[in-house]
Image: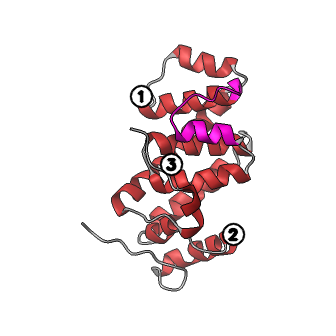
């Protein structure tokens, strides 16, 4: 197994340092994922830029985290599920919705959020090959055509981090450990 370094803003490759410093200023620490991505300044910049773009999407903050959490569960990324559980709580996603996603169940108490969860799940599991009916169901739930592409954007962001975490076997940060996740069999 190849061991990957977890850099910080002082010892990372020079081109990665400004990105890690920005992360530390925002979060108070450099998350392990970003510390590992710093090995490649281009990968780190790509992830952070894509994150900033996704934040600008028209989805509500809780909806954005629902997309990120759902994609991470479908990709079985323990690191990102732990991280996005906490971030989803902070963004106002209801606890019952978070638990449903983590347990790979329907969000029974909220049809609107369930439509987003289901659409995200289908895009991930079907590698984007969803049916016209799937898109219509999503739109009928009150989402927009722009939201279709924003869900794809969120999935692209999580695909980058989920795959990096799988390969590097990123340890969950202490601040995310309270939300540790074990995949449902």
Compared across the picture, whether 161 is left or right of 117 comes to left
Q: Which residue is mark 1?
A: 126
Residue in the picture at 69% in, 24% down: 111
Return the x and y of residue 113 as percentages of the image width and height: 67, 31
Pointer 2 or 3: first along the chain:
2
State the image coordinates of residue 60 (x, y, percent, origin top left): 74, 41
Q: Residues within 10 Å of mark 2 (few under 14, many from 20)?
A: few
Q: Residue at x 42, y 45 (%)?
A: 76
> Looking at the figure, which quarter contains the N terminus?
bottom left
Q: Is residue 2 above or below residue 58?
A: below
- Give, as a single range, the part of the protein colored magenta: 95-112
* Secondary structure found at label 3: helix
Is 123 rendered above or below residue 14? above
Q: Looking at the image, tell me whether mark 2 or mark 1 is earlier in sequence order.
A: 2
Whether residue 143 can be seen here = no
- The mark that comes first in sequence, 3 or 1, is 1
Q: Which residue is mark 2?
A: 26
Q: Is residue 37 visible?
A: yes
| Residue corresponding to mark 3 | 158
Image spot of residue 18 (x, y percent) = 59, 76
């Amino acid at each position: 197994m190849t061991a990957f370094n977890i850099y910080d803003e002082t010892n990372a490759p020079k081109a990665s340092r400004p990105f890690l410093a920005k992360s530390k200023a925002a979060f108070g620490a450099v998350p392990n994922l970003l510390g590992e991505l710093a090995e490649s300044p281009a990968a780190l910049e790509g992830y952070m830029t894509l994150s900033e773009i996704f934040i600008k999407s028209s989805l509500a903050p809780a909806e954005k985290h629902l997309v990120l959490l759902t994609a991470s569960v479908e990709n079985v990324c323990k690191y990102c599920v732990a991280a996005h559980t906490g971030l989803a709580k902070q963004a106002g996603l209801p606890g019952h919705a978070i638990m449903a996603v983590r347990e790979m169940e329907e969000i029974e108490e909220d049809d609107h959020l369930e439509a987003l969860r289901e659409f995200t799940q289908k895009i991930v599991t079907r590698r984007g090959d969803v049916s016209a009916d799937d898109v219509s169901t999503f739109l009928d739930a009150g989402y927009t055509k722009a939201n279709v592409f924003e869900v794809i954007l969120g999935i692209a962001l999580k695909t980058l981090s989920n795959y990096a975490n799988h390969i590097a076997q990123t340890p969950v940060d202490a601040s995310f450990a309270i939300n540790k996740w074990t995949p449902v069999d």
